[in-house]
Amino acid sequence: MSYYYQSIPEISVEELALKLADRDLSLQLLDVRERNEAEIAFVEGFELIPLSEFSTWSTQILVRLNPEVETIVMCHHGMRSAQLCQWLIHNGFTNVKNVSGGIDVYSYLVDSSIPRY
């Protein structure tokens, strides 16, 4: 999954918290961390699709998700999610955002009940 780099739009954890509080059901929320990481800490509403299992779900995700709907991608610190954002943009997704700082910053600034690791 290597593509020419282009700037990836980001969303702050505070902005994410507001969107989650609004319970906007049109959002597509993706968490690319590993299963063992999600067992430690998880944000309700995100779909777990481990980046390490990319070959298993990549073709399905292009069919199942709407490329025009806001798609928010999260990982632990924002690096793996940036990779998926880049791939989604390369595959025609027009409204993709990477969670700046990932679940670690979300836990620190928004919801301290989510364990940090």
Image: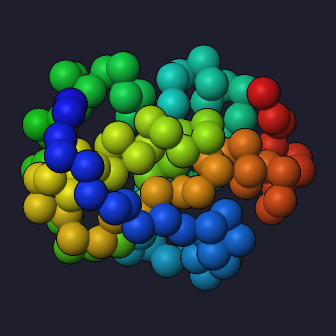
Question: Does 44 appear above or below 26?
Answer: above
Apparent side of residue 47 relative to residue 59 in the rendered image (left or right): right
Q: Residue furthest bottom?
A: 22
For the C terminus, the image quarter is: top right
Residue 18 percent location from the top left of the image: 66, 78
Residue 56 percent location from the top left of the image: 21, 23
The quarter of the displayed image where residue 41 is located: top right
Instruction: Give me the residue at 18% from left, 46% from top.
Output: 4
Question: Does 23 appear above or below 60?
Answer: below
Instruction: Give me the residue at 21% from left, 31% from top.
Output: 1
Q: How is the image coloured?
A: rainbow
Apparent side of residue 102 relative to residue 63 in the rendered image (left or right): right
Q: Is residue 59 visible?
A: yes
Residue 30 percent location from the top left of the image: 43, 48
Residue 74 percent location from the top left of the image: 51, 48
Q: Is residue 47 visible?
A: no
Which of 67 and 22 lies nearest the eye of the viewer?
67
Which of 8 and 74 lies nearest the eye of the viewer?
8
Apparent side of residue 81 relative to residue 54 in the rendered image (left or right): right
Instruction: Give me the residue at 37% from left, 28% from top.
Output: 51
Which of 102 and 67 lies nearest the eye of the viewer?
102
Instruction: Give me the residue at 11% from left, 61% from top.
Output: 92
Which of 44 and 51 lies nearest the eye of the viewer?
51
Picture mark count: 0
Apparent side of residue 29 relative to residue 23 in the rendered image (left or right): left
